[in-house]
Amino acid sequence: MVSKNGVGVTEIGHDSESRTLVNGYNPPGSYKRKIKYNISMEQIVAIIKQSKNCEQFIKYECFGSMLLTDSDGWWVSRQGSNMTYWGGAAVDSGKCSCGMTNSCAGGKKCNCDMNDYAWREDSGYLTDKNTLPVTELRFGDTGILDGFNERGYHALGKLRCWG
């Protein structure tokens, strides 16, 4: 347990916290990473229900790899639903955090949706207690196109609940 403004925070770890390469998965969602938590889902749900707030940081770094355009990537809720918005954006908005402020590269919904050969990043906190924690990460658009090796890296933070 750690502290957030003097309030105890419960952190729940998992096996996918480190930066992980996504490469060679071209069809949408063909890369699959199931998240294995250190405690059971029943215990996690009990902690979420007794907490006022929960958050989980999610990040995708991309090089020629789209995220939400063409539904190339998504995360899966604890109920098994494909979630097509990213950290820092409103639930079901279909956007990343930069899309909420119209500040994404090229005016897209996410920086990664620029789909150019520059390293870009979309990241932020997921905060919807009804769907957390993330149970799976899915990505695509990481094949070879016109001789360029499209790729990405994902990272997912611990689930943190407090209050």
Image (cartoon, helix red, strand yellow):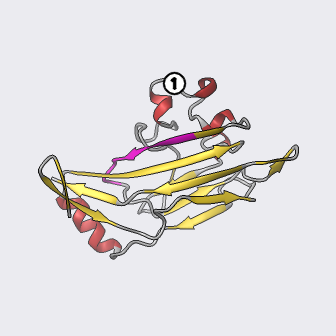
Q: Main secondary structure of the magenta part?
A: strand
Q: Say left or right for 112 vs 115.
A: left
Image location of residue 50, percent across then percent down: 17, 60
The furthest residue to the left: 6
User: Which of the pair 133/104 is nearer the observer?
Assistant: 104
What amino acid type is highlighted by mark number 1?
Ser
Which segment did they paint magenta?
121-130
Q: In the image, what residue occupies the spot 57% across and 66% down?
A: 33
- Label 1: state its secondary structure: loop
Image location of residue 108, percent across then percent down: 60, 28
Image location of residue 157, percent across then percent down: 41, 57
Q: To which residue does mark 1 refer?
A: 103
Q: Is residue 45 above or below residue 52?
A: below
Q: In the image, what residue occupies the spot 46% across and 50% down?
A: 58
Q: Is residue 159 above or below residue 84?
A: below
Image location of residue 54, percent across then percent down: 28, 53
Crowding near the residue tagged with mark 1, few <14, some 14–19, many ≥20 C-alpha atoms within 10 Å: some
Q: Quadrant of residue 159?
A: bottom left
Q: Say left or right for 71 vs 136.
A: right
